[in-house]
Amino acid sequence: MAFQFRQEVLFRHCDPARIVFYPRYFEMLNDCVEALFATMPGHTFADMHANRAVPTARIETEFLAPSRLGDVLEFTLTFPRVGRSSLHTRFVATCDGETRLRAASVIVHVGTGLRPAPWPEDARAALMAHHEETSQ
Amino acid sequence: MAFQFRQEVLFRHCDPARIVFYPRYFEMLNDCVEALFATMPGHTFADMHANRAVPTARIETEFLAPSRLGDVLEFTLTFPRVGRSSLHTRFVATCDGETRLRAASVIVHVGTGLRPAPWPEDARAALMAHHEETSQ
Amino acid sequence: MAFQFRQEVLFRHCDPARIVFYPRYFEMLNDCVEALFATMPGHTFADMHANRAVPTARIETEFLAPSRLGDVLEFTLTFPRVGRSSLHTRFVATCDGETRLRAASVIVHVGTGLRPAPWPEDARAALMAHHEETSQ
Amino acid sequence: MAFQFRQEVLFRHCDPARIVFYPRYFEMLNDCVEALFATMPGHTFADMHANRAVPTARIETEFLAPSRLGDVLEFTLTFPRVGRSSLHTRFVATCDGETRLRAASVIVHVGTGLRPAPWPEDARAALMAHHEETSQ
């Protein structure tokens, strides 16, 4: 089941070309992941950031069409794979049915010293709820 | 010949895990491209943004090791391909010889209505100075 | 009547000291103003930014207590004065009843060439709904 | 003696009105302070952020004229007062002799638990080099 996240394109996202400045899309993607973890008691970003973290190890992104101030972007987030300490993500952002962005990343669950640490069982179970094979 | 760009990791780049927050790396990559265009008279970002722009169409990035406050990152930027209206980039960022980030993107030169527009000849020539085949 | 705006403190707002990095508060204040204008048909930021804008001319801010990841900030925005082309704002942000931030700014409504332009009558009326004298 | 800091207005600073988005000015002001502390051995932001920090307690800012992509801003930073654990700052940013911004802030030196801590003697001495009474 995909996790849904809505983000209106705000003034702070836009550049002098009057479209979303692409680094701001990554802030949105991060907000989307953070919103998902906010649904996982004990594993919100606030819970985790005492001694754990979920840095992004790689990400690839296609920007298929520009987004403008006031556009409402609908993000869907699924996990093609939940590894031992990794998380493979897939994002699609659309506006009025038009795909604006597609991204795939690998996130790593790390503990002290930023070393990979296995997902706790309850976290894994919660993430698996958004597991979805991708044919793409 | 690679274009060189130096960026110290500043407070504003860092997150509560005390490493660079990955969306900030994309601001650095954009600054790097902007610095390169700043060497091309008539094609600086300020020159261009009246009726042209160079949006990013896709980008893939590997974050190989975390960067911390005070690290000095050395970016090298080369262009594996300069297309008719596109530009294929390759970035490597290192700190003290350790590779922190590798990225590859496709940038598009657009004119009115964000429609692809051929690179002006002098711009193409300037970009070709940083052309470099990649074996990778 | 104060305009209410809620913003959770997100990962992207926080710095290595694990509190909100103060420039990010100004992004929140801008989002708050943008949310208010979003309630004014014909005067949303998207509507305006073809040939109008609302730059900030001055702002003063007190950061009374630090905010941390996961804190939910409640902003209230009132307008001590709605001028001919200016808007005097007052912001208070609280979390669980503790005041975190107080700010006051002057925003200017500008048209072509960034020259001050009188508020349209309907915009003024909408803004006056949030007019509130301040004794402070 | 004023501390000098130069910052070109970059693409990432600018908004759809094609001027500096005002929260970005605060990133510049923070960079300016960070650059000054970078000249103080043992008190760089990297040195400090293990168990100390210098949060901003208040700041007031006037934006006197808009800044555009490519403008080169010259910041001068002086300290009207160096308190026991506080630092009163004054910033002026100009471009080609035109004043764009004036700001004054109070920064606090804090230790564990974000509690105010006296400036170390060498830090105080370094800061006092930029002490300047203001008649304003």
Image (spheres, coloured by chain):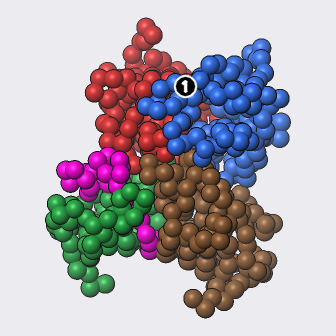
Chain colours: A green, B brown, C red, D blue
The relative height of residue B27 versus residue C102 in the rendered view (above or below) is below
Looking at the image, which residue is at 52% across and 56% down?
B20
Is residue B33 visible in the rendered structure shown here?
Answer: no
Residue underneath mark 1: D117
x%, y% of residue D86? 60, 23
x%, y% of residue D76? 76, 34
Is residue C88 visible in the rendered structure shown here?
Answer: yes
The three-letter amino acid code for the residue at tag 1 is Ala
Looking at the image, which residue is at 53% across and 36% down?
D52
x%, y% of residue C131? 40, 19
Q: Quadrant of the C terminus of chain A?
A: bottom left
Query: Would you say residue B59 sits in the magenta stretch?
Result: no
The relative height of residue D63 versus residue C132 in the rendered view (above or below) is below
Give the magenta part as a residue range: A34-63
> Is A88 placed left or right of B114 in the picture?
left
Query: Would you say residue A58 sits in the magenta stretch?
Result: yes
Looking at the image, which residue is at 65% across and 71% down?
B97
